[in-house]
Image (cartoon, rainbow, N blue to C red):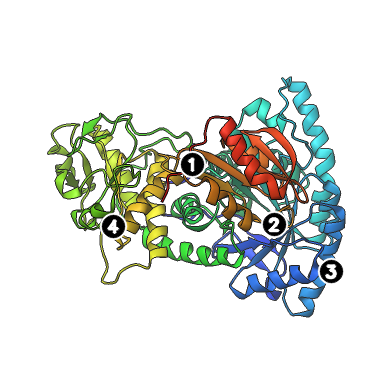
């Protein structure tokens, strides 16, 4: 299976065109050769028409091209009529997407008023109970029949009204049926989406797109790659040379990219850049949403900045002797290397964690400020490491390598994009039988001007994060960020976001929407103030139950909106305390962390 022609050459995947609204009056076409579409979501109550209109206009003003609004009930879905009508009176015709979970009736009502309906296969026709059950083949087929019966009316209505559909699978809300057959896996996410796609195709409805979202960038990347490969397989199985070109690639539906529950601030941007950016650099993606626990217009700024970096991070001119992958694109595994010792006695490679290297100039600036117990500190100085710098296109460099215990990197000045250069380096090392540990750099050349911090962050996260998700890299060096302390911190934050090491509390925080039962920004800040000193602890902050228990399954503790003004607390995906008044919930969360032996008192500043 392949998700792209070559891991070294950028070539955008050409998908079917999906029309959302009337392109002549504010609608968009995604897929084909059209630019990547940017979208976001409202954070207010859908029944508040005035606020919904206000937030939509604010998003459109900053360049948002599709606006999503939650519709948890039929009543909410019906009010979309008023929201859309008021927008039209203000000459705003941006396509609106109704976000549906659990209630097919709400989807049918919403289809009357909006240009697109998003359904989640995990809960559109199923209720998640985390039940363990063995399904026979006959029982499984019967379940699919039940789903088809519930889903078909929506498909027929969308087709009749010329609406669009998003089949949006979430890692945190796979159905019990999928979980019991496929497990909590990328394969389960893909098959869940394909079940619904087959129903659409059975009724000759093709105006839909896919999404495969997860709060874990590695999982999200694997899911989209696997989905694309499966769609390619389905194209080949149904290939008919006598059919029109569009039909020969009939499974090439557009992809909506996003890392769900990415969080806020630098961490949210890094996670999103790793997941979305790496796939864009592989040529995948027709529309994106950066999910931040911040005001929605700020998501569009990050979308713009991220999309602007892709041409500089990709290249179509490199010549490579092979299109084989130097990693398994569908199952994460860190590249095998021997363990070596760096200058200063720090071990690297093998089973060691990914190390953080700095230049001598950076070390000189940050060293006086580092305390003995600090977790964020340099673990090696580049100039002291005797790193073997290589041109991955020059086979002579590989012939002169000598031994597997030499730390290697790509030399500065190589005219390849960073991702291409290091993938090619790994491939050539394997070809020559070398297992050398690899030092990743975020950039291989420096322009005449210094990068803005927000741009340096995105570029470093895409380049280094993408390679770490491939399993390549035993140490990293960030140089695109000119600030010494900021570059050191950025390196550690990329490693944490990529799941390579944990040096601080990890937060999984959803963006706000109309289903949210408390102020996510305020609550997230309050929880961070109390818990940000807990190294290695993962806390999920979820506004409602839709993705709560599932998406935070690998979190240690969860803080989830259960009802207006009430919070439920979880350990893993198990609810422990219910209906706690919001005013007391953070204190009870701390108590729960203490009860499970994860609490330590913060050091006095």
Residue beneath disc 4: 479
Q: Residues within 10 Å of mark 2 (few under 14, many from 20)?
A: many
Sequence-wise first label, 3 or 2: 3
Sequence-wise first label, 2 or 4: 4
Separation of marks 1 and 4 at Cα, in angstroms: 24 Å
Separation of marks 3 and 2 at Cα, in angstroms: 18 Å
Q: Are marks 3 and 2 in contact (CB under 8 Å)?
A: no
Residue beneath disc 3: 82
Q: Are marks 2 and 1 in contact (CB under 8 Å)?
A: no
Separation of marks 3 and 1 at Cα, in angstroms: 40 Å
Q: Are marks 3 and 4 in contact (CB under 8 Å)?
A: no
- Residue 486 screen position, x and y as percent: 35, 58
Q: Secondary structure at mark 3?
A: helix
Location of residue 428 by image quarter: top left
Separation of marks 2 and 1 at Cα, in angstroms: 25 Å
- Residue 197 screen position, x and y as percent: 70, 44
- Residue 93 screen position, x and y as percent: 72, 73
Separation of marks 2 and 4 at Cα, in angstroms: 37 Å
Separation of marks 3 and 4 at Cα, in angstroms: 51 Å
Sequence-wise first label, 3 or 4: 3
Residue beneath disc 1: 218
Q: Residue at x 51, y 63 (%)?
A: 302
Q: Are marks 1 and 4 in contact (CB under 8 Å)?
A: no
Which disc number belongs to residue 513?
A: 2
């Amino acid at each position: 299976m392949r998700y792209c022609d070559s891991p070294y050459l950028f070539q955008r995947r050409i998908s079917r065109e999906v029309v959302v609204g009337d392109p002549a009056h504010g609608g968009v076409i995604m897929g084909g050769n059209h630019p990547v579409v940017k979208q976001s979501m409202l954070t207010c109550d859908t029944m508040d028409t005035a606020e919904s209109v206000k937030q939509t206009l604010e998003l459109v003003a900053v360049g948002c091209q599709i606006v999503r609004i939650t519709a948890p009930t039929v009543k909410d879905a019906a009010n979309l009529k008023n929201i859309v009508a008021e927008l039209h009176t203000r000459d705003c015709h941006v396509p609106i997407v109704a976000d549906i979970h659990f209630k097919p009736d709400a989807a049918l009502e919403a289809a009357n008023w909006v240009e697109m309906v998003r359904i989640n296969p995990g809960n559109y026709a199923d209720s998640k109970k985390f039940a363990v059950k063995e399904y026979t083949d006959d029982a499984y087929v019967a379940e699919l029949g039940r789903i088809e019966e519930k889903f078909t009316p929506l498909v027929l209505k969308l087709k009749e009204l010329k609406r669009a559909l998003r089949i949006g699978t979430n890692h945190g809300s796979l159905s019990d049926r999928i979980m019991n057959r496929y497990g909590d896996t990328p394969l389960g996410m893909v098959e869940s989406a394909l079940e619904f796609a087959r129903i659409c195709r059975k009724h000759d409805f093709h105006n839909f797109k896919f999404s495969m979202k997860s709060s874990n960038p590695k999982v999200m990347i694997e899911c989209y790659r696997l989905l694309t490969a499966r769609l390619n397989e389905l194209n080949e199985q149904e290939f008919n040379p006598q059919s029109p070109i569009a039909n020969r690639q009939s499974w090439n539906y557009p992809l909506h990219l996003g890392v769900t529950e990415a969080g806020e601030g630098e961490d949210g941007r890094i996670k999103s850049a790793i997941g979305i950016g790496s796939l864009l650099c592989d040529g995948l993606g027709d529309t994106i949403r950066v999910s931040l626990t911040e005001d929605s217009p700020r998501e569009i700024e990050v979308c713009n900045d991220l999309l602007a970096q892709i041409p500089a991070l990709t290249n179509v001119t490199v010549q490579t002797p092979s299109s084989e992958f130097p990693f398994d694109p569908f199952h994460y595994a860190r590249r095998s290397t021997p363990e070596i010792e760096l200058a200063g006695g720090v071990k690297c490679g093998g089973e060691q964690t990914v190390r953080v290297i700095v230049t001598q100039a950076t070390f000189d600036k940050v060293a006086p400020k580092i305390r003995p117990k600090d977790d964020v500190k340099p673990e090696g100085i580049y100039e002291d490491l005797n790193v073997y710098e290589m041109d991955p296109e020059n086979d002579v460099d590989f012939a002169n390598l000598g031994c597997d215990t030499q730390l290697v990197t790509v030399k500065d000045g190589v005219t390849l994009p960073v991702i291409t250069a290091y993938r090619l380096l790994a491939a050539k090392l394997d070809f020559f039988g070398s297992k050398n540990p690899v030092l990743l750099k975020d950039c291989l050349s420096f322009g005449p001007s210094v990068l803005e911090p927000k741009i340096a962050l995105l570029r470093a996260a895409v380049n280094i994060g993408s390679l770490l998700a491939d399993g390549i890299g035993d140490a990293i060096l960030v140089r695109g960020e000119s600030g010494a302390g900021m570059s050191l911190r950025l390196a550690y934050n990329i490693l944490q976001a990529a799941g390579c090491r944990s040096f601080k509390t990890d937060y999984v925080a959803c963006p706000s929407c109309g289903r949210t039962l408390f102020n996510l920004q305020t609550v997230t800040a309050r929880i961070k103030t109390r818990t940000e000193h807990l190294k290695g602890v993962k806390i999920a902050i979820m506004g409602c139950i839709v993705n709560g228990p599932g998406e935070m399954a690998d979190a240690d503790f969860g803080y989830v909106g259960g009802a207006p003004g009430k919070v439920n607390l979880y350990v893993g995906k198990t609810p422990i305390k219910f209906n706690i008044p919001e005013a007391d919930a953070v204190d009870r969360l701390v108590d729960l962390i203490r009860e499970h032996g994860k609490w330590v008192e913060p050091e006095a500043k």
